[in-house]
Image (tube, grey):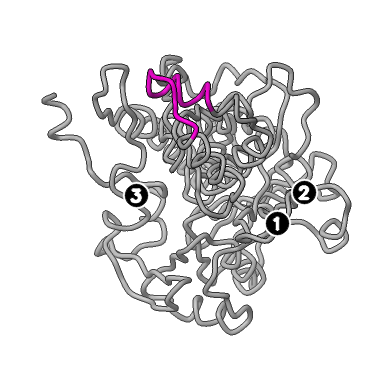
Amino acid sequence: MGSQVTSPKLHHYVPQFYLRRFANDKDQIGVYQRASGKTFVAPVSQTGAESGFYNILTEDGEVSTVIETEVLSRVDSDGAAAIEEVLTGPFPPSDECRSILAAYAGFQFARGRMFREIYRVQSDFMMKALAQQMTREHIREGLRDTAGAEPTPEDIDQIEKILREPNSYTVAPHNNETIKVMMRMAEDSYPFFFKRRWVLVETPKSLITTDEPVVMWVNEKMKNSFFGVGLMTADELRFPLDANHMLVMLQPDADITEDTVVLPDGARHLNPYHASTCYEYIYYHPDHRDSLDEVLEIVPLSTQRPITHISSGFKDIAQGDTYALPVKPPRVKKVEWSEHCLQLDRRVFEIPRRHDCVTTIDGFGSMSDHFHRSDPGDARPL
């Protein structure tokens, strides 16, 4: 219990060390909020964070901050050292550095609010789709198991009415399940970063970053393809490392010979797309507000977060809210991390399961089994 008193309340989904690479000497960073269109300068310590974001419940029902204080703190420490080596040492980096930075990029891709929203929307959608198939007997069994007593016909009628009106309720997975998915996604995405062709882009003008620093970019032809875009199929994975350097990870067979590229006008070409993929916030160096103004002039951002529609096949759901799903995480074959990679305690992958969802309906369980098949097959985007 003593450790909980000193545990941080604010959990950073964008690490402080990373934000400081875009901050001034007062440890402040410029922030643009997509929803309001407001800009302000904030302390790094208060930016890219949310209270209790990575809290989990132990088997004893205690709140634990182990993900923030032991797992992600280790990930961030190793990631910070790897980025420093990339920017100050020879490029391409050593295999050890490359492996650690690939693992860090995987965590950054999966740890933010956008990925969490994707999982929430998928869980909500899947549970509602399953609910459409439930019979009165299924409802009776669920209520009996939950309440420990035989439900009345009126109880069954009430639940059946809710189930047949999917827009009248929402289902959200427990934070334990969400974080387990985050951890698995971070590990599974590692090879997609490690195996790519890495190019370090340098630009004299200031780069911006966002609350989703790792983004996927595809050419116009691929955007119209039948196939989805994921970490495997994206033409480029882009990751700003500081205000003047961006790591661009190309397809392994990309036709480029240079390892480092200097683009005098690189910020003007790179910043707008990066800004457009933010979940809610754009971050920039406070002394270079012109970099943000240029972005907003080129690409006026919608106040709404990026959205896409899930085709449900169920009329009621299809007529409901448009779901926020701007990035499609890939389904991958199991690939072991390299010997140089982060040696995390495997116990972090044994987060206690929670069978309670945040929902208006009793009796539903965890969704994680629906998204982790025992034989996922070849790597491909979902």
Q: Amino acid at mark 1?
A: Ala
**Residue 267 lies in what quarter of the image?**
bottom right
Tell me where residue 202 appears, x and y as whole percent.
Answer: 60, 60
Between 335 and 244, the one nearer to me in the picture:
335
Q: Label 2 vs label 3: CA separation? A: 43 Å
Q: Is residue 244 above or below residue 340?
A: below
Q: Is residue 144 magenta?
A: yes
Between 271 and 335, the one nearer to me in the picture:
335
- Of labels 1 and 2, earlier in sequence is 2
Tell me where residue 142 appears, x and y as whole percent.
Answer: 50, 24
* CB atoms of marks 1 and 2 within 8 Å: yes
Residue 94 visible? The answer is no
* Residue plotted at (42% across, 34% down): 174
What stretch of residues is rendered in magenta? 140-153
- Relative to 31, is 381 on the left or the right? right
Q: Is residue 294 magenta?
A: no
Is the stretch drawn in magenta largely helix, strand or loop? Answer: helix
Q: Amino acid at mark 2?
A: Gly
Task: List the residue tagged with mark 1.
Answer: 318
Tell me where residue 127 appears, x and y as whole percent.
Answer: 59, 37
Task: List the residue tagged with mark 3.
Answer: 16
Mark toward the viewer: 2 or 3? 2
- Relative to 165, is 254 on the left or the right? right
The quadrant of the picture occupied by the C terminus is top right
* Callout count: 3
Say few, some or many: other residues with alpha carbon within 10 Å of mark 2 (under 14 / 14 to 19 / 20 or more).
few
**Residue 332 lies in what quarter of the image?**
top right
Q: Is residue 375 above or below residue 40?
A: above
Task: List the residue tagged with mark 2.
Answer: 313
- Of labels 1 and 3, earlier in sequence is 3
* SS assignment at label 2: loop
Q: Label 1 vs label 2: CA separation? A: 7 Å
